[in-house]
Amino acid sequence: MRAFVLALVAAAVIAVVWAGFLNQVQEPVSEAFATTGVRL
Amino acid sequence: MARMKFLCDADRCIECNACVTACKNEHEVPWGINRRRVVTINDGKPGERSISMACMHCTDAPCAAVCPVNCFYTTADAVVLHSKDLCIGCGYCFYACPFGAPQYPKVGNFGSRGKMDKCTFCAGGPEADGSKAEYEKYGANRLAEGKLPLCAEMCSTKSLLAGDGEIIAKIYKERVTKRGYGSGAWGWKTAYRESIDT
Amino acid sequence: MASLIRILRLMLGAWAVVLLVSLAAPVQAQQPSSVNPTASSVKEQQLLQELNRIQGRVSIPDARSGVLEQPAGRDWRNFRDVTLRWVGGIVILGMLAALIIFYLTRGMVRIESGRSGRSIVRFNAFERAVHWMTATCFIILAISGLNITFGRPLLIPLIGLEAFADWSQWAKYAHNYLSFPFTIGVIVIFLMWIAGNIPNKVDVDWVKRGGGLLGDDHPPAYRFNAGQKFMYWVVVLGGGAVAITGYLLMFPFYASGIEGMQIASVVHSIVAVLFVAAMLAHIYIGTIGMEGAFEAMGSGTVDVNWAKEHHSLWLDQEKAREATAGARSAAAAPAE
């Protein structure tokens, strides 16, 4: 039982860390495709 | 009842991008989202053609068919619209659309690409016609005011035509007959399963 | 006088010739009824057949908007709406039906000699934790994934558009976030159990003798029998495939154009439905299919008689290891 609970916690923690990382990678298209002439 | 269609006369388009600018301005489309775009084929070579492309509002729209949450609907004028409230930003409509009409506000897909945005034929969305909520989400609703899409209205050479399919087919047919040649109605075979024969 | 008439006749004749010639010449420009204008130019249909897509130059920084038309979307639509639903439906419902029939005819595989009351350790805590992390993630990934394919026809009539859209939004978040713990689990499983899952002659024999499933034989096996090795490789290879294609889909257009995305989607969904079917069989045999099986992953220990009947070679190895460890500790110096 302990192993199962530990597994759930591990899954949740890894998922949260992953979500945090993805937030850094994700960017709005206005930034992604901005050229030097654009003022955002 | 009118069946609304777009037609871009590839032999008249001069790549001025007035249609793009008109659309962007009228609906306050954010930077990075391109509801309408002008593509130039064979740029600089003989047979160079420019075509203005946005959503074609297809018969049997593939975007509507593949949407996992069924957020699309077709109006009585055959305009294909969708609900941004239901959209989950999965991106399937972009994979299915032959013309690349769906646009998304975010680059990655992890949580969401954000709500899909596309050309509405200046017909707004599910919210009340002309309401503030409708404008913020979908842009202006010109059709409800009895006007035609602004891109076609602003076209400097009248290459982009928008309106009832039969009327614009007739206009195009006249042009082709007068000229003696025509590169065909772009996208009509794919979108409406018909071609304009002269 | 005669010469004047002759000149006049000549002039008239000349004019007549000119008139005749001009009349005979083909009519141009004004009425091109003999020329078919559309046929004489490059048609869209022709271009679509020659190329797999039509693209040109755009002034927009996003290069994807240069694609004017991509007909492959039509094939992808057909796959997503028709083919995948048939394949997924047949594979998953077929497996369910097969398992039900198997259970009703064969019944639960019992421990023939009954429980001995003695048990040995089969999987340690770390192994069990990794298994359950991967398994739990798989369940949620499977449900959220199947929702994308089957949710619209099955659930919208039941709960309506708004509720379904909300549920699907959260299902999509869950699918994307839990993909990473699932991937880690698959990688750890691959490294952790690779030693025990290399196929050998014992597996060939095990399969030939029905593997204890068909008939009442008890062919010997090491720690993992051939059926389990098959499952292992399904998880590692299938899990690897869905992970790779899944990340391609999750970071769209980082590594490919629209065709690459469509192919990734096809591979991801086909492997996924086959994976689900395989896991249904795995869950069956690990729970109601076999007496004494679940505790291996539940508590980590199994009954010795169960081990004797299903993994005799592994039991011998474990006993031998215990014996040498016991002998060594008896002869060893007092604890350091």
Image (spheres, coloured by chain):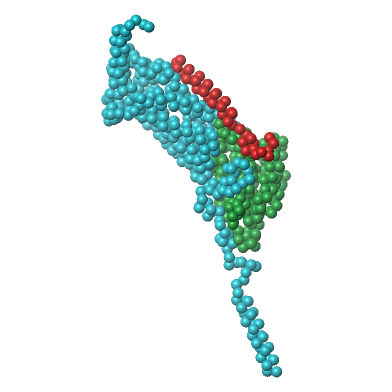
Chain colours: A red, B green, C cyan
Count of numbered circles on the image: 0
Residue most extreme to the top: C334
Query: In which quadrant will I find the C terminus of chain C?
Result: top left
Residue at horizontal 47 percent and vertical 28 percent from the top: C183
Residue at horizontal 62 percent and vertical 76 percent from the top: C23
Q: Position of residue C91 (x, y in %)?
A: 41, 35
Residue at horizontal 66 percent and vertical 82 percent from the top: C15
Query: In which quadrant will I find the N terminus of chain C?
Result: bottom right
**Residue placed most toward the observer, B142 or C237:** C237
Q: Position of residue C246 (x, y in %)?
A: 49, 33
**Residue placed most toward the observer, B186 or B198:** B186
B175 w.r.t. C90: above or below? below
Residue most extreme to the bottom: C1
Q: Position of residue C319 (x, y in %)?
A: 30, 15
Asked if residue C111 lies left or right of residue C10, the reply is: left
Residue at horizontal 27 percent and vertical 30 percent from the top: C208
Q: Position of residue B110 (x, y in %)?
A: 55, 31
- Residue C154 at least partly seen: no
C39 w.r.t. C208: above or below? below
Give the image quarter of residue B122: top right
C323 w.r.t. C226: above or below? above
- Residue C64 at least partly seen: yes
**Residue placed most toward the observer, B103 or C210:** B103
Asked if residue C200 lies left or right of residue A25, the reply is: left
Asked if residue C197 lies left or right of residue C179, the reply is: left
